[in-house]
Image (cartoon, rainbow, N blue to C red):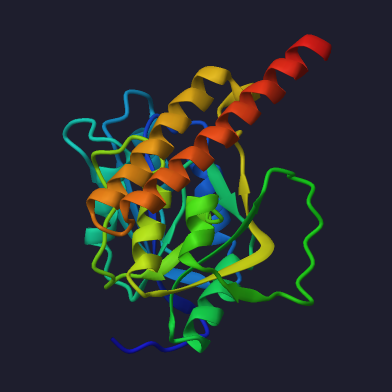
Amino acid sequence: MSFALNKHHADVSVVIPCYNSQKTILRALNSIFKQTLLPREVVIVDDCSTDQTLNVLNDFFCNYKGSVRILIEENPVNRGVSFTRNKGWDLSTCAFIAFLDSDDSWFCNKIEIQYGWMLRKRACHFSGHKCSFDKKYNFEFDNIVFTKISPWRILISNPYPTPSVMLRRDLPFRFDESLKRLEDQLLWAEIAMSGYGSSYCSTPLAFVHKAAYGDGGLSKNIIKMEIGELKMYYTLYKKKYLNIFSCIFFEIFSLCKFFRRIVLLSFRKIFF
């Protein structure tokens, strides 16, 4: 696979899974088309939305005359975000894939910065960056640095929000469709633990417009996330990425983090 820097377009396919995203999808799309370096392709896969998402997309693109290739696909039945991302991945044609959720958005330099880095560092097979929850974040681009991330760092705490990730399309991996949560962290861990290079940038290049554990950090969502994390470690053990002792260590570590989070939430409810 050959890589080349085009002054007008990056050899990047943007994959957007969407489900009932009529209120947020335009914000995500506008953040793509405002990029200082446009992607060559945008692949949108709708997971059987029941709202007006498809109508919003059709209205947005009905008179589109831009240079970015647009592909909109629909799942015949609701299959979940992992299947939908994998479908977008398989439909993509560019050398690199950048993931963007339909309710998040990118800063205008994201593709130019991240794509440029990955072209210069051929040993880097996937990269990610910090995301900001603060819409008024003051971005500084004077000293942007990507650093190497070890697989163990990914296992301890996921440093790669999905809207931050750009990877090579030809990687022989996909999202695990049997998991409903932490399927992204599992994929990043599998790639890194298979010897593929990964990098991380501490400068936020994307906005995440939703709380990590749901609005207000509801305890029921935290419980579901904890169950998902335990399943992730067990899946890595079954796939022989972890031995039994490492699996037990990470599961105990995960449970300690979980109980600490529950205590902090309970404390806030009582005293605040």
Name the image quarter holding residue 228. Answer: top left
Residue 173 visible = yes
Give residue 54's position: percent from left, percent from top.
34, 36
In this rendering, position of residue 176 left or right of residue 58: left
Please, which residue is most extreme toward the front here? 245
Residue 68 visible = no
Please, which residue is most extreme toward the left here? 76
Give residue 159's position: percent from left, percent from top.
56, 55
> Dividing the image into 4 quarters, which one contains the C terminus?
top right
Q: Which residue is pictured at 67% across the width and 22% down the height?
A: 263
Q: Which residue is pictured at 54% across the width and 60% down the height?
A: 153
Name the image quarter holding residue 109. Answer: bottom right
Above or below, comparing residue 213 to residue 202 in the picture: above
Q: Which residue is pictured at 28% across the width and 46% down the height?
A: 235
In this rendering, position of residue 261 left or right of residue 10: right
Give residue 113's position: percent from left, percent from top.
60, 74
Q: Which residue is pictured at 55% across the width and 52% down the height?
A: 30
Give residue 179's position: percent from left, percent from top.
30, 38
Observer-nearest of 257 and 141: 257
> Dividing the image into 4 quarters, which one contains the N terminus?
bottom left
